[in-house]
Amino acid sequence: MKGEARASLKLDTSHGNVGRDTGPIGKEPRKSKSSVKNRQAPPKRNKRKGRLSALPTLPLDVLYEIFAHLGPGDLLHLARTTKAFRSLLLTRRSLSLWKEVLDVSAANGDPVKPDDMSEIAWTALIFGKPWCTMCGGRTSNPVLWALQMRPCTACVLKHLYSDANRGLVSFGAPLTHVREFMPSEFVHYPSPSLKTKRWQYAYRKTDYNGYRLKLQDLHARFPDEAKFEEQRGLLNQDLRRALDARGEWARACHARERAKEKDRSNEMESIRAQRLEDIKSRLRLQGFEDRDLDSLSFRHEPNVRASKPLTDSSWAKIAPGVTSCAECVRDHRLQRESLQRRKDREDVVGCAYLEFLKKIQSTTISFMPSLSVILGLPRISNAIRKDTPASNHLQRIVGDALALSWSDIVQRINKQALQLRYKVPDGWVRRSCTLRATPTLSVESTLRSLDLVSHVWTCGGCTEPHILYGLDALAHTSLLSGGELNSHISPSSRAHLAIMQLLALLGLDPEETTVGDMRRIANSKLFICPKCDHNRERPMLCHSWTSAVSHAGRSPHDGPFLGPAEFTLVKLDPLQERSALQRAWGCCHCTFHLKLATTRSEQHLQTAGPWPQLVELKQHLEQSHGIQEGVEGIDYFFNRQNPRAIEEKGIPVPTKDIVEAVELLEGTATEQNVV
């Protein structure tokens, strides 16, 4: 009867009528006639027999004897191959076989099977990687020893409770967490959408629900609260003892797993080391050096890093790729060595250039080109072009080349000075002069017509606006590569009007007053702007001459009823300039400011030394030259390649003091006129 039912089921399934109401029997639909001769039976396919197809036909005692020499993982994989092996290995008759192989596995260092798990379930937990023990899906999650499972992400959400909202249970002991007597693990618990995860403790839903049902049963059996609490305490004690045993066993499993992984890692590392040595021995015969073969990039090449023994056949396959990688490593090393030798030769040029700067006039250093420009000079470039190591002989050659390149340097400065002269507006003072290539070149004396303080420039290429006076514009652009003047240098008409007013207040001739003259005369003078909104109850802003020019260029005094900014001279104590804190001061009597650079970043003109501050330089003048009150331009100078720092907003001074100073100054002028 069962056979007939099964046959009828198969028949209905083949016609697609399973679970479908066929209705009353009616006239059969007309079918098209077909010739029997034209019908062709489908070809029969013989199932391909594998290498293990003959094993199930052997006697059981022979099979068990063979299987006894396999490991638990091998038996598990074999049971997953065919139905024949699955029906043979997953029956109670093979239970002794599983016990035997698990005993051998435990003796070899694998974790011991717990009493509450079957042999096959334990084997799937230990050796069933990478499959989930709950649903059989693929997973990379580790084994949760305390929970005796390896769940996938979906099964974590399905079979585990998180500790976030299940910490307490109804009828449980107050302030007692279920994790104290229930196995739990710190897992990457997913959100309900499986899109995000968060690390938290989790425990089995079956354990939690079972504990909750036990508490409900105890509460129903023992209505008395005291008796119920007593029975609940006994239950919790039993669970704690079981949890302690489970925890000790889980820690042992963790330790054995880590030891096994470490042994496996050491084994793989020894195989990789031997493979690397075999590859290096073959490449040494081709002329490669150990410093290339020991490089990190070569050792991490996939064919070299593979954890497989090297054989002749495998070497024949990977030889082209490994050889190409070794050649690339060698080429990169040679390129780095060549680049380092180039840097060493450039360092030689930097040291020679520093010595060369000590031989010229100190105030000329501000207009000398940078090291990158010196390296581009023809004689210097030819001297260091050959790929040779740095030596004393090369330093002498570079020194001679610098001496011969002096005319090229002068020509470069003269070209920039000529470009600067072309930018001078027609209404400004203009004079013609040409540099001469002399051993003691003095730019200030030779290009005096361009160093007038009335020539005021701005640089639009700087991040902060700077006002440049005279040859400051030439020094500001001297560090740029090439011989062209910076295209961002432009004249400032507003600042020019302001400096002309200041020169008139001081009684100085605009056609003769240089920047150095202005600093010696006007650095001790202060000015105020009468057009600014002054309040006698608030301090007024006093300006130095540089701060006054900056104020005129920044404040909008040229409205419909106001003309350009105007200034009044006041007699107060001079203010200390911010430029005194800049490391840009040099000595006119020696090369104290030109010290040997300690790093490559200091081997350019602005920081070679490094340059001292004004206080340090005055101490040097007093200790080394006996000069107590040095004069700028005579005893010390400012490196004009650095924009000179000023107090742009002025210094607040009480209004009463300024009024008294102005009245005193006007009274003194009146007395002089009377005399």
Image (cartoon, helix red, strand yellow):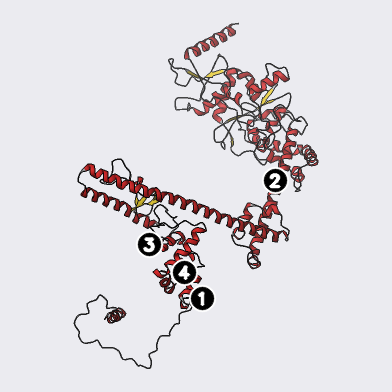
Which amino acid does the dot numbered 1 rest on?
Arg
Residue 103 sits above or below residue 520 on the image = below
Residue under pointer 1: 51
Residue 355: x and y, percent?
Answer: 75, 33
Q: Is residue 413 above or below residue 516?
A: below
Q: Secondary structure at mark 4?
A: helix
- Residue 135: image tag: 3
Which mark, residue 107? none
Q: Residues within 10 Å of mark 3 (few under 14, many from 20)?
A: few
Counting residues from the start of the chain, the first of labels 3 and 4 encountered is 4
Q: CA distance from mark 2 to mark 1?
A: 62 Å
Question: Label 2 amino acid?
Answer: Gln
Return the mark for residue 78: 4
N-terminal label among 1 and 3: 1
Q: Which residue is mark 2?
A: 340
Mark 4 nearby-residue class (10 Å; few <14, some 14–19, many ≥20)? some
Q: Nearer the viewer, residue 37 or 246?
A: 246
What amino acid type should be assigned to the residue bearing mark 3? Answer: Cys
Q: Secondary structure at mark 3?
A: loop
Q: Amino acid at mark 4?
A: Leu
Q: Label 2 to label 3, Cα distance in Å?
A: 61 Å
Tell me the mark number nearer the camera, choosing from 4 and 2. Answer: 4
